[in-house]
Structure formats: structure tokens, C-alpha cells
Amino acid sequence: MSSVTDPADGRVIGAAERMEHLLEEITLADRVGLYSFGIGEHHRSEYYDSAPSIILAAAAARTERIRLGSAVKVLSADDPVRVFQEFATLDLISKGRTDLVVGRGSFTESFPLFGLDLADYDSLFIEKLELLLQIRDNVEVTWSGKHRPALTRQGIYPRPVQDPLPIWVGVGGSPESFARAGLLGLPLMIAIIGGEPRQFAPLVDLYRRAGAQAGHAPEMLKVGLHVFGFVAESTQAAADTIYPGWNEMFTKISRERGFARPTRAQFDATSGPNGAFFMGDPQTVADKIARVGEQLGGVDRLSLQMTNPRLAHSDLLRGIELLGTEVAPLVADL
């Protein structure tokens, strides 16, 4: 959840007001029948979501049906014991509506912030995921590793409503990450920010084959997509509404990482029929969901990131409404 500049008057929305807007957006998503809502985790000046479980708990108190999850929880930079305790508590507050999606995150600020070495990027996540799964499956845990003090028959409380608590693995494009999730039998959430979604078909196949070879039932091997996009009255309106904030966001990231500055032509190409962005009127977005689902051999969940730093609250509310009332019914039977 990033800070927002109101496109109508150039006013920067304050943190407290933006938080209230976010809770209104989640409440509307619940009211129009959307299945889930996720909150990311960032430790940067332009974001307000460094404590996603607290935001989700506030949303749980305002909603009735929608599932609430992390998108993603940066497990590498946190203590699996505290992560489990926080999301088990959230599961109690929400009466069993919690999904914990864990990953490494797309930014690295959390590593120096919490005294971690980027050289341990992979081993931190692998070890902490192992511990998190042990905690999920056992009330008392005995465990030892490199990055955290050992546990000896210690109870981890509270326990969630859901048994087991759903834990998804957020991945980018690493084959090792897809295979590992399959071997563990964990649902997969794929972050697609560029290229063409169909390019992920071999990796999804690798995930499913690894899961099958490890003896996991097909229904355990769920595939979710986390993608950029927007729903508006027309495809042109969707693109024009989203582009200013997208350009600001990716210009900053490109500058930090030494990439070429993004262009409108690049944005339009990525928003096209085969591109990574799910952009357009309700029918266009629904058609793309169906097409990509077929290309990947089935998709169980699609998380559409519609927020950006120059999107008016009223436009986002309308996008959520269209997503719930018009797009979701069109794809309900896929």
C-alpha cells in the first residue's frame, strides 16, 4: 500500500487518510463478493504497509466473507514464530479467513533494517519456511538452524481456526522456487510483472510434476497469479487511469536498479492481449483471465493489483466494484 497523490489536485494523501481509504476499499471488496484481498509488506518511505497483519486485523473487524492475506509476507526478514503467531491471531479475529503468502519480497530494504546479510538471501528463506511449516503442523516444536536460536519442545500459541493454516509460497521466475513449492505440496502464488504470462507454463508444469513425484494430491497443488491491472468502463479508460502512477512507480524503480526508463509504448504493449497486465473493461479482463488460465493448465486464484501512487480513491473503488460485480461472475465457472 503506497502513498498516493490525488490526480485531481496534486494533493498528497496523508498516511492516516490513505489507511482509512484502504479499509474502505477492502470493505467494498467484501460487499461486492470478491474472494480475497491481500496486503503487501514494504519498508520504504513511500509505503505504509510495514505491518500487514495489523492492517488485515483491522479489515477483519469490518468484513464478513472475504479472505484476507499477505501479498507477500517477507519471511526472510522475520521470525517464523512471530509470523505464525500474528497470522494465527488474524485467523481467530477473522474466524478462519486468513491466507499466509510468504516470499522473499521484491525489495531488499528489510535485510539491512533487521541486520541480515543479503548473501544469505536464499538460505534465510529456505530455513525459515521449514520452521514455519513445522510450527504450523506441531503445537510443540523442536528445531535448530543457522539463522535463529533453537527451539526445544516449545509450544507456539495461539493456534488458528483453520487447521492447517493455508500457507502459499510467492515466487518470481526461479525454477528452483517452483520445484521447491511442489516438493513441499504448497500452493503457489506467481508474481508476473512483465513479459507474457504464457511463458510461465513450463515452470507451472515443473511445479506440478515435482508435487506429483513427491506424492501430493493434485488438489493441493494450487496455482495463483499476482498481476498488475485495472478494470474500468473501457479498455482505454483503464489504461489512461493507471498509466501516470505506473510510470511514476517504475521510473523510480528503474532509476534505482539501473534499468532503462519505462515508456508508454512499453506500457501499452504489456497491457495488450498477450501481455502481463490485466487491463480493460470487464469482458476484456474476464477473457484474458480465461485465456491465461488455459495457457497455464488452470489457475485457482488471480490477485489483481490495482493500486498505484496516482490513482484516485474514487477510481479504485469503481474498479473494485466492476471487478466484483462484472468480472468475477464471468469467470466464476472457470
Image (tube, rainbow, N blue to C red):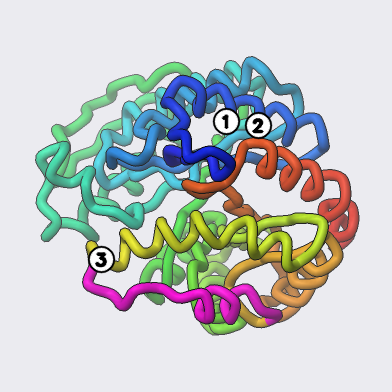
- Give x and y (percent) for residue 311: 57, 46
> Is 150 included in the stretch rendered in magenta?
no
Q: Amino acid at mark 1?
A: Leu
Verify CB contact (< 8 Å) between mark 1 and mark 2: yes
Q: Nearer the viewer, residue 236 or 166?
A: 236
Q: Nearer the viewer, residue 266 or 194?
A: 266
The reply, left or right, for residue 292 in relation to residue 281 is left
Tag 3 secondary structure? helix
Q: Nearer the viewer, mark 1 or mark 2?
A: 1
Q: Give the labeled residue for mark 3.
A: 255
Q: Quadrant of residue 297?
A: bottom right
Q: Nearer the viewer, mark 1 or mark 3?
A: 3
Q: Give the labeled residue for mark 2.
A: 26
- Give x and y (percent) for residue 121: 20, 57
- Give x and y (percent) for residue 13: 47, 30
Q: Amino acid at mark 3?
A: Arg
Residue 205: in sight, yes or no? Answer: no
Tag 2 secondary structure? helix
Q: Nearer the viewer, mark 2 or mark 3?
A: 3
Label 1 crowd (10 A; few <14 / some 14-19 / many >=20): many
Tag 1 secondary structure? helix
Q: Give the labeled residue for mark 1.
A: 22
The answer to whether 125 is drawn above or below residue 12 in the figure is below
Q: Which residues are magenta?
A: 257-273
